[in-house]
Image (tube, rainbow, N blue to C red):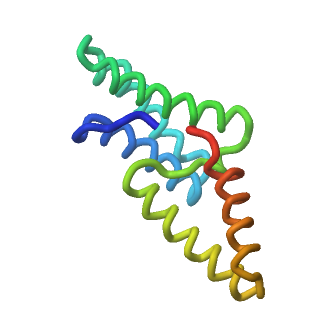
C-alpha cells in the first residue's frame, strides 16, 4: 500500500469505503460513490503537484472497476482506519469461531495464515 502522509488520501478513501459499505447494503445504488471518485480524480486532483494523490485515487477506482467487471464487489475490503478496524474485528471473530470448533493452537495459526493469504494477500 502507498505510504500516506497526513490526510492526502482521506477523501479518496472515504469515497471508496462508502462505495464498499453501501454496496454491501444496497447493491448497485452504491455506484454513485464510484462516479464521484472518478469526478474527484478528474477535477479535484488535476493539479500537477497532486500526482501521488491522483495515482492512489485512480488505483482505488481501478479496484472498484475490476471488481464490478468480475462481479466480485462483495469481496472488496475497506481501506484506511475503517479497514483496520474491520480487519481486527473480523480476525477476532474468526479466531473465536475456530476455538469454538475445537481447533488447537497450531491449526488456528495455520488457518489464520491461509485466511490472510486468501483474503489479504494482495495489495488491492
Q: Residue furthest top?
A: 48
Camera-nearest residue between 5 and 75? 5
The quarter of the image holding the C terminus is top right
Q: Is residue 7 above or below residue 58?
A: below
Q: Is residue 90 above or below residue 33?
A: below
Camera-nearest residue between 34 and 116? 116
Camera-nearest residue between 95 and 18? 95
Q: Is residue 91 above or below residue 96?
A: above
| Residue 99 shown left or right of residue 65 in the figure | right
The residue located at (51%, 54%) in the rendering is: 22
| Residue 108 shown left or right of residue 21 in the figure | right
The residue located at (28%, 24%) in the rendering is: 44
| Residue 27 shown left or right of residue 83 in the figure | right
Q: Position of residue 68 (x, y in %)?
A: 66, 36
| Residue 108 shown left or right of residue 28 in the figure | right
Q: Position of residue 74 (x, y in %)?
A: 66, 51
Q: Position of residue 99 (x, y in %)?
A: 69, 85
The residue located at (44%, 58%) in the rendering is: 84
Report how many numbered discs are placed on residues in the image.
0
Camera-nearest residue between 121 and 26? 121
The residue located at (31%, 42%) in the rendering is: 10
Among the 4 quarters of the image, the one containing residue 109: bottom right
Q: Is residue 111 above or below residue 31?
A: below
Amino acid at each position: 500500500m502507498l505510504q500516506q502522509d497526513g490526510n492526502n488520501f482521506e477523501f479518496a478513501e472515504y469515497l471508496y469505503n462508502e462505495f464498499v459499505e453501501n454496496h454491501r447494503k444496497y447493491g448497485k445504488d452504491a455506484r454513485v460513490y464510484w462516479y464521484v471518485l472518478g469526478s474527484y480524480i478528474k477535477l479535484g486532483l488535476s493539479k500537477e503537484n497532486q500526482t501521488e494523490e491522483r495515482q492512489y485515487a485512480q488505483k482505488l477506482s481501478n479496484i472498484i472497476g475490476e471488481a464490478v467487471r468480475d462481479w466480485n464487489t462483495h469481496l472488496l475490503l475497506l481501506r484506511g482506519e475503517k479497514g483496520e478496524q474491520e480487519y481486527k474485528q473480523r480476525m477476532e471473530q474468526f479466531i473465536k469461531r475456530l476455538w469454538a470448533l475445537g481447533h488447537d493452537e497450531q491449526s488456528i495459526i495455520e488457518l489464520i495464515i491461509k485466511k490472510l493469504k486468501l483474503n489479504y494477500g494482495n495489495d488491492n
